[in-house]
Every structure is written in C-alpha cells, then in structure tokens.
Image: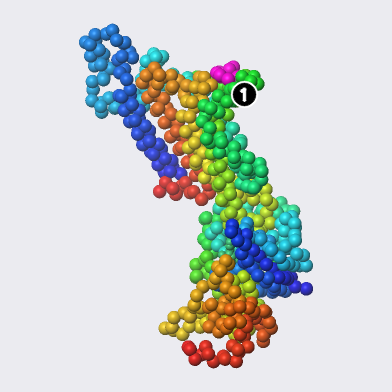
Amino acid sequence: MFAYLVKRVFQAIAVMFVISLIAFAIQGNLGDPLRELVGQSVSEEVRQQLREELGLNDSFLQQYLRFAGNALQGDLGTSYFFKEPALDVILKKLPATLELVFGATLIIIGLSVPLGVYTAIKPNALLSKIIMGLSIVGISIPVFLTAILMIFVFSVELGWLPSFGRGDIVPVWGYWETNFLTADGWAHIILPSIALASIMLPLFVRLIRAEMMEVLQSEYVRYATAKGIRPWRIYFVHALKNTLLPVITVGGVQIGTMVAYTILTETVFQWPGMGFMFLEAVNRVDTPLIVAYLIVVGFIFVVTNTIVDLIYGLVNPTVNIARMGA
Amino acid sequence: MSLLSVRDLTVKFAMRDQTVTALNSISFDLAKGERLGIVGESGAGKSITGFSLMNLLSRPGYIDSGQILFDGQDVVQMSEKALRSVRGNRMAMIFQDPMVTLNPVLTIGQQMVETLRAHRKLSVEEARQIAIVKLREVYIPSPEERLEQYPHELSGGMRQRIIIAIALLLDPQLIIADEPTTALDVTIQADIMELMLELCQSNQVGLILITHDLGVVSQMTERTLVMYAGRIIESGSTRSIINDPQHPYTQGLINALPQQTLPGHQLRQIPGNMPTLAQVPPGCAFNPRCEFATDTCRSQIPKISQYGDVEVACHEVHRLQTEPAREEEQA
Ligand SMILES: Nc1ncnc2c1ncn2[C@@H]1O[C@H](COP(=O)(O)OP(=O)(O)O)[C@@H](O)[C@H]1O
Ligand SMILES: [Mg+2]
C-alpha cells in the first residue's frame, strides 16, 4: 500500500512538473508584462531598468527555476489587474467553482446510475429508447446553448429560477462561502449545475448502460440466475458493482475535466468562479493570473485522478494495492 | 416415475437473417439418482441441452416446442417465480470454466450464503454454518477462511470444488455439470471427477454429465446419450455404448480415444467437422463424414430404433452388424 502510494505521488509530481513547464512557456509568450504594468508613456531607459528588476533579462532556466521555486511556496505572481497575489485571487474564486462542480456531480451521479441501469435492463422499452435518443441530443447540443435555452425557459418565460450570480451565500470557512445553506443559494445553483452536468450526463448514462449490458452477458450473471437469485439482487449486487468499477476511473477523470468546463457555464450564468475569472483574465492579458489558473486547474486534475485511482484500488478486490507497488 | 422426462425438445436460435434449429426433437429420461452422460464433439448441442433443462437459454435461443418434465412439472411452462425456486435448489448446475463462473467482486461466503437464503429462511450465520459443512465435504482446507476470500485468490481447481459445494448446498435432486473439468489442469481433472462421483453416489443425486470425453463417461455414468448436430443419434447403457457402439459416429468417437490407439500410431480422428447449424446437410447429418453413407442416408433423416441394447438413429445399422470385419481389415 505504501509503495503504491509513493509511486502514485511521484507520478503526480511528474505531471505537475510538465504542467508548470507549459504554464511557464505561456507566461513568456503572452503579451508584454511591462506594457500591462506601466503603459505607453515610459521611457526606454526606465523600461530597461524595470526589465532588469523583474528578472526578464535572465536566462530561461534561471527564470523557470525562480518561477518554480516561488510556485512551490505558493507565490504564483501578482495579478496585473487585481494587484493581489494571483493565487489569492484564484482561491477566493475557487469555492464558487467547486460548488458548481459538486452540484453538477450530484446531478450526474443521481441520474446516470438509475438511467444507465434501467436502459441496460430494459433495452427495448419505449422509455429506454426515449432516454437513449435524448442522450444523443444532449451530447450534441453545446453547453452554452443548453444554458441559454434554460435561462430563456426557466428564468425569462416561467420566472422560476434566477439566471445569474450566486444569490445569498453564507460564509463557512476562510474564503469559502456556500450556496447550500440558503433557499436562494439553492435556487441560484440549480440552472448552472444542470448546464454543466448536461455535457457529461449523457456520456455517463451511455457508459453505464454499455458496461452494464456487457456485465449482464457475463458467465457469472448467468450462474447467479442458475442459482435462483432474484433479479433485483442480480442487477444491483452482482452486476452493478462490476459495472461501476470501470466507470469510477473514467468518471473521476471526467469530474476533474469538468473544472475546466466551468469556463463556459460560469460565463453564461455570470457565476463568480474561477472559470469566469479566467476568461476575464484572458481578455485583460493578465498573464500571472492565467498562468496561476492553469497551474491550479492542473493541480486539481492531478489530485482527483490520484484519489480516484486509490479509491479504485480500495473497492476492487482484484486489485491488490499492496502488491501493485512492487 | 422418472425424475426428468424430456419429450421432443426443440430449441431454435432466432438469428438476424434466419432461424436455425439447435436441438431437434430430443427425448430422454433420467431416473432418480441416475447418472447420465451426454457426449459429442463441440457444437453438437450438449450445452444448449443443459441450459434448456433449467430454462436458461440466453437471448437469441428459445425453446420452440417440447416438454421438460422435472418431478412431474413442465419446466418449459413454469413462471419465472417457479423457475427460481427450482434453479439452484432442486436442480443445480456446474459451469464449464470456474475462472469466470464466480462473481469477482463478491466473496465466496457471500456467494454461498445468498444461494442458501434465496431458497430457505435462514440467518446469515446459519447459512455460513451450512456453507462450511459443504466446503468440508468437497475437501476444502480451512473453510472458514475461504468464506472471506475472493475468487481470484483461489486456484481453478479450488474454485471448481467450491462450485461443486454450491451445487450441493440445497441438496438438489439433479446436478447438471457442463464439461466441469475441461478448463482445469489435467493433473486435477481426475480428482474433480472422482469427487463428483463420490458425492453424487453418497447423496443420491442425479447427474447429467456433459463432456466430449467418452473415457470420462465410462467412469462416471450409467447411461449415455450421443449427440450430433442437435440430435440424439445413439443412447443406451454406458457399458453397451462403450463396448458395442452401433452408430458409425459413436464408433468413430471410441476409435479416437487415446487408449484405443496402438503405440506409435496416430490418433484416429473422425475426418471432417461437425456442420454449423445453418449448414446441416439433408438426410442424416453425419453422412458427409460417414464411410457407410448411402443415397438413403443423404436424403432421409434416420428414425431412432431399438437395436440390441441401444437405441440408434442410423439407416445402415443392420448392414454394419453383418460386416463387422471391415474395421479390423483396415487397421
Ligand atoms: N448464442 C448463440 N447464438 C447462435 N448459435 C449458438 C449460440 N450458442 C450456441 N450456438 C450454436 O448451437 C450449437 C450447439 O452449441 P452448444 O450446445 O454450445 O455445443 P456443445 O455441444 O459444444 O456444448 C453450436 O452450433 C453453436 O454454434
Ligand atoms: Mg458446450
């Protein structure tokens, strides 16, 4: 177990190294930081002096090492626009994004398992055909279209749900303010969560259905039937666990990816998370903030993948974590 | 009254472009506690027969007509609920490959306990005690520990013993074993067969043993059915079938046994292959591979008739009987 953990952590560090290289390369190629800092009206001499002070004249390696060293201490540079440490800016926005991802994840898990299982058990039922048809439609409609349609129907026409912002939020701890403690907060998070979930939900339904149908063809399911086990037990004890094992791995990766997908959803709903912030940072060529965003998102991605792998190892009896390290 | 009475069982597969017949009007009986072998090359319809007896055919396959009377009740007509109470309880099945039969994510204990509790009102603890007793009967060392293990932690032979123990859990009247040792290491095949024979005899359990190995059939069973292309082509006491086979196909199977081959000689396999279901030739399905085939064999399906101690479906039995020297001349 310990060896496996160490191995996974090393892999994670290697991935973070690559991400930091990419982020650093972007930093050197996006706009001219001096122009953002001082504007046009400064003499070339002063510019040159500032360059020297900022270390922009050092070699690539020196600059990267300084960048990585600072990053390890939590210093990802200072946002040109906010004039604050970039990491702080992001951490303030992070809870809004994580809550949105959490909301979408709840919807995905809550719906994809029953829908996937149902369509696998009753592939010829009318309802199954409708679900599968909708899932194709769902996959092919872009998120912003789903979002705008929902705003039109539920906010503009019916007036049931608010269309932008987080509404009443309650401070919990540090920068973390939550939507989940007020009715208004819940109302505000519903549409953005559905919009974000709409990309992954059809994929998950289809994935679970395909896995489940394959498992239902397996010899051990036929054997369970031959032992006189009830259908519900075959579906939910024998088949579902075997179905969900591969889904966990794919699912974990997808939830990590969803953090990046929030950019669109947050922009449409003006959700004050880091995706929305990222788009603004790009518009303002706020390079430190862009770079910090990439690193934080990369970090979240790596951490979720590592955790998912560990969970997979724990729930799957045929993976012996103790031995896998060797 | 016999324990099992199969009458004119016909099984078909509804394929995309056509419907093919996998079992063609087969009939046989099994007395209480009797051990019956079903032999034939791969593709003869042996497994389909086994699954049909439990009404457990999977999708494109279905029972087209016929009766399967088990203890007087027709399995073909039973409701799902009635079938559930038969399966695993009064009729148990041992599958071919123990590596894929047990559920990989459930412990041996869970898979044994659930079987008991599906049929009897027992607490988990009571069920575990019965499971332990049955594991002892199949000579599994430290059964208490096995209950906590997952299938992948056990060898193939151990798993097949556990599957035999599961088959015996509810003291069934009939066990259907479909090539139970084919997937196992040769060194333990005989042990497993011996164990099954011992348990069936001591518990008075009927056995239908499906195999392609006539040698195994001769050790294990009292009566034998020989199948070819979805039909029973010869049946009778195992002794008669082994010592005095009538059908050219059965004779070919026996001549192909390793112990029939003189040292230094090649195994005498029957030339050609079993036809696929879509391409069963007219007349006797065996005729393209049969050295005695006549025009009648190529056009008319032979009826089953009593001949000596056995029932056989062959147009040429009488002629074969009068020309027994032919085999020896060639040898
Ligand atoms: N699911 C299926 N769909 C179509 N044909 C099948 C299916 N299962 C078995 N068959 C055919 O039925 C015939 C008998 O199969 P089986 O009973 O498994 O033979 P065996 O005697 O080797 O056990 C074979 O020709 C096989 O190809
Ligand atoms: Mg078979």
The residue carrying mark 1 is A153
Q: Say few, some or many: other residues with alpha carbon within 10 Å of mark 1 (under 14 / 14 to 19 / 20 or more).
A: some
**Residue shown at 46% from the left, 37% from the top:** A305
Tell me which amino acid carries mark 1: Val
Question: Is B164 above or below relative to A43?
Answer: below
Residue A152 visible within the image: yes
Q: Residue at x 68, y 56 (%)?
A: A228
Residue A63: image quadrant is top left
| Rendering quarter of residue A42 | top left
SS at circle 1: helix
Q: Position of residue A204 (x, y in %)?
A: 55, 39
Percent position of residue B177, x then y: 62, 67
Q: Which residues are magenta?
A: A162-172
Residue drawn at point x = 47 percent, y = 33 percent: A257
For the residue pair A79 and B309, the one nearer the viewer reads as: B309
Q: Quadrant of residue A26?
A: top left
Q: Quadrant of ligand 1?
A: bottom right
Give the percent coordinates (x, y) of residue A202: 56, 37
Q: Residue at x 66, y 65 (%)?
A: B11
| Residue A109 in the image: above or below residue A68 | below
Vertical comparison of B170 with B288: above or below: above
Which percent across, then down, holds residue B294?
Answer: 57, 83
Classify residue B186 as left or right of residue B102: left
From this viewpoint, which residue is outermost toward the left? A45
Rendered view: A74 above or below B3: above
* Magenta span dominant secondary structure: loop
Viewer can see residue A310? no
Q: Chain of mark 1?
A: A
Counting every numbered tag in the picture gives 1
